[in-house]
Amino acid sequence: MNNLGNFALISAMKQIMVPGSKSVSCRALVLAALSSKPMVLRNILDCDDTRVLQDGLASFGVKFKKEGNDIRVVPPAELTASGQTIPVGNAGTPARFLSALSVLISGEFTIEGSSRMAERPMEELFSVLKLMSVEVSHQEGFLPATFSSSQKKEKSVEMSSIVSSQFLSALLLVGAKLAPFTIHLTKPLPSTSYVQMTIDLLNEWGITVENNAFQTFTLTGSLRSPEIFSIPPDYSAMTYPIAYSLLNKKYALDSDRGCVQLENIPSKTYQGDEQFLAIAEQFGAQIIRSNTEIEIQPPETLQGLGEVDFSDMLDTVPSAAILASVAKGETTFTNIGNLRYKESDRIEAIVENLKSLGVQVESGKDWIKISPHPQPLSQRERVVIQTHYDHRIAMAFGVLGKTRDLDLQIDNKECVSKSWPNFWLELADWGGEMRSVSAVIVSNQDKYLIVKKPRKNHAWQFPQGGVEIGETLLETAERELREECGKTLQVKFVAEKVGEYAYFFPTDFKRHEEEIVGAKVSFFQAEFISGDIVLEEEELEDYKWVTKEELKDYFEGEYLEKIQSFL
């Protein structure tokens, strides 16, 4: 194996940055849109759901400006609609939040979704909106639906929230603009964690919510946005690297190499799925917290959970299910009936796919019982995992296949774009299959240095090169700039990297034979001070200083968009 592969194996611990929370991102976008002044959302998740929600809010007059990895939100004086149709695809959260905003919007609009979205019940929300003087035209409680609001604003409303707690969260967000405002539930709330998240975020925006046993909610105060709000990492997404660590049998004889360190974890996450850390401990993992990091140390043998209530962490069930499939002892997931109304019927999807791998699984209306395979999980022939276009099914079984050396074909792999677009690149990186590269963006006033190297088909790029054993990413960037451009070039580096770009090599690229399938490029910025760039036949055949606008003549696609967002 080449040096990079050896580096992956001798590293004691894999450090992983998890993307921002989808649930917090969506709630923060709505609250920012309802605020009275512009604000910045930091570390917001860039995925299908947040893009759909931003497009919907933009059609109502909200403006969004990308600033690096941040987004500046500029709300209008009034949200308005002019008969537009908003496509939400398979995005359930935007569908519910945008529907609820009809209470506050002047004008008429229509929401339509995918065929699966048109099967997900919305009647409870529609019924409450009608009580709040919204005219809703729909087909038997499903999308597509058309909304038109009157000027009358109710100050109190009753509802049930059995199918989805998002109905309640949507009304709580709208209630922030109507405060004082009261919501009373006529039936018990099946899951409280996401509602509590909504309440916590309302508090950040200046709204006090008096919560009477999750039955009556009274909102008071005035909506006041913070100047900057940072989105915490997504704990639902965090379950996949945790599961990877616990399942990775390559490291079974050396648990240190199976350790995962999750970085940039704030003390306040707003997310009920944080309980998955306790679930990992029940499986046998050791969890070590320090400052803003969480270290996951896997056990030699996973232990079954017995019977566990997962009602407050439903999105973690697929990850827990793949762990249970190889654990010692049975696991029964209870009170998970609402999984049947997600992007897929997740109960059936989990059962179907585990059975295809020979795992004994039983299920009922709101439970799954998993009895691990008596032999190590394996199969002789390729198995197709049916995702039903569900991102959580795809990611969970992707982790299972990678860690257990299973020949799995993940159907509709692209569905992960709903919550973690770069997931397959990240999964390859966890396994040491991605080459680590550092690149330098050197600026000279309003121009940037690009170079042409004799290898890589003489393509233009920034000065860059692979990380060697013992080097930090920044040290690699400094070395490569010196080696490629000459020792007389003097620059001032910005110590923190400004972003990353990852990509897979073409399948016929020679590195596939070395078990390296792609590259993960870390970008650093530097300011030109003085000196000359030296052309050397082996290192550099040409260079140019180009403006940001001129970069499009040399780069394209997602790479170009990424680079321009760094500048």
Image (tube, helix red, strand yellow):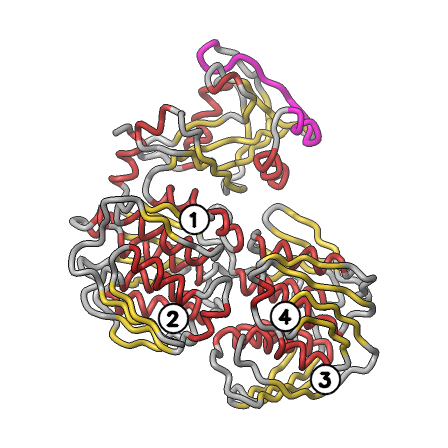
Q: What element carries label 4?
A: strand
3D distance between C-alphas at marks 1 and 2: 29 Å
Q: Mark 4 points at which residue?
A: 142
Q: Do the residues labelled 3 and 1 touch (CB within 8 Å)?
A: no
Q: Which of marks 3 and 4 is nearer the N terminus?
A: 3
Q: Is residue 542 magenta?
A: yes
416 versus 346 height, above or below: above
270 versus 290 height, above or below: below
Q: Name the residue under label 3.
A: 131
Q: Mark 2 points at which residue?
A: 275
Q: What element carries label 3?
A: helix
Q: What residue type is labelled 1?
A: Asp
Q: Earlier in the sequence, mark 2 or mark 4?
A: 4
Mark in front: 3 vs 1 = 1
Q: What is the magenta range?
A: 537-553
3D distance between C-alphas at marks 2 and 4: 32 Å
Q: What residue type is labelled 2?
A: Gln
3D distance between C-alphas at marks 3 and 1: 42 Å
Tell me what residue is drawn at x 76 percent, y 77 percent. Answer: 134
Residue most extreme to the top: 537
Q: Nearer the viewer, residue 403 or 219?
A: 403
Q: What residue type is labelled 4?
A: Phe
In-image side of 442 versus 105 (left or right): left
Q: Mark 1 points at which residue?
A: 411
Q: Is mark 2 on a helix, strand or loop?
A: helix
Label placed on residue 292: none
3D distance between C-alphas at marks 3 and 4: 18 Å
Q: Does the magenta stretch include residue 153?
A: no
Q: What residue type is labelled 3?
A: Leu
Q: Which of marks 1 and 4 is nearer the N terminus?
A: 4
Q: Which of 319 and 20 is in front in this view?
A: 319
